Amino acid sequence: MATLEGDWVLLEPRVRVLAHLVPAEHRWIELSDGRVTVYGTFPAARDQQCRIEHRLGCPRQALPDLWPWLTALRAENGLAADRRGEESPPEPPAALPNVG
């Protein structure tokens, strides 16, 4: 999705979370014109919903256990990918080959 700054960000599809459950720097809200921006208001309104970046919900990313609900989302995303038959990306080599 396009941001206010003209950049692009990949957001987790179909996931909307109550903003007060997400740290301010990770809250993305959709604006009426279709763009998104970080919702840094603190404290967030109790009924405000936000979205998160896909990298936070991606089961293939090596991230720490940031929030219990996010860990559950990542586990479910991993199961969904397995059901669709998606393969894990190959492991990078331990060392680069000597090419001269």
Image (cartoon, rainbow, N blue to C red):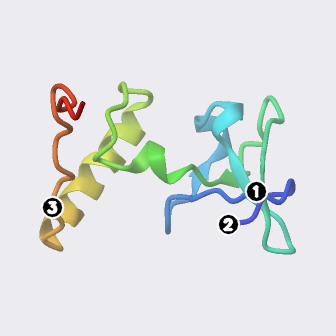
Q: Where on the picture, by quarter, is residue 88?
A: bottom left
> Local crowd at mark 2 within 10 Å, few (<14), some, or many (≥20)?
some
The label on residue 1 is: 2
Q: Residue at x 76, y 56 (%)?
A: 7
Whether pointer 3 and pointer 2 mark residues with C-beta atoms closer than 8 Å, the reply is: no
Q: Amino acid at mark 3?
A: Glu
**Distance between the Cα atoms at labels 3 and 2?**
26 Å
Find the residue positioned furthest to the front: 100
N-term mark: 3 or 2: 2
Residue 65 screen position, x and y as percent:
36, 26
Provide the residue designation for mark 3. 87
Between disc 1 and disc 2, the foreground one is: 1
Q: Where on the picture, by quarter, is residue 24?
A: top right
Q: Amino acid at mark 2?
A: Met
Q: Secondary structure at mark 3?
A: loop
N-term mark: 1 or 3: 1
Provide the residue designation for mark 1. 7
Residue 77 screen position, x and y as percent:
29, 57
**Distance between the Cα atoms at labels 1 and 3?**
29 Å
Q: Secondary structure at mark 2?
A: loop
Q: Where on the picture, by quarter, is residue 31?
A: bottom right
Q: Amino acid at mark 1?
A: Asp
Q: Secondary structure at mark 1?
A: loop
33 sits left or right of 86 in the view: right
Q: Residue at x 34, y 41 (%)?
A: 61
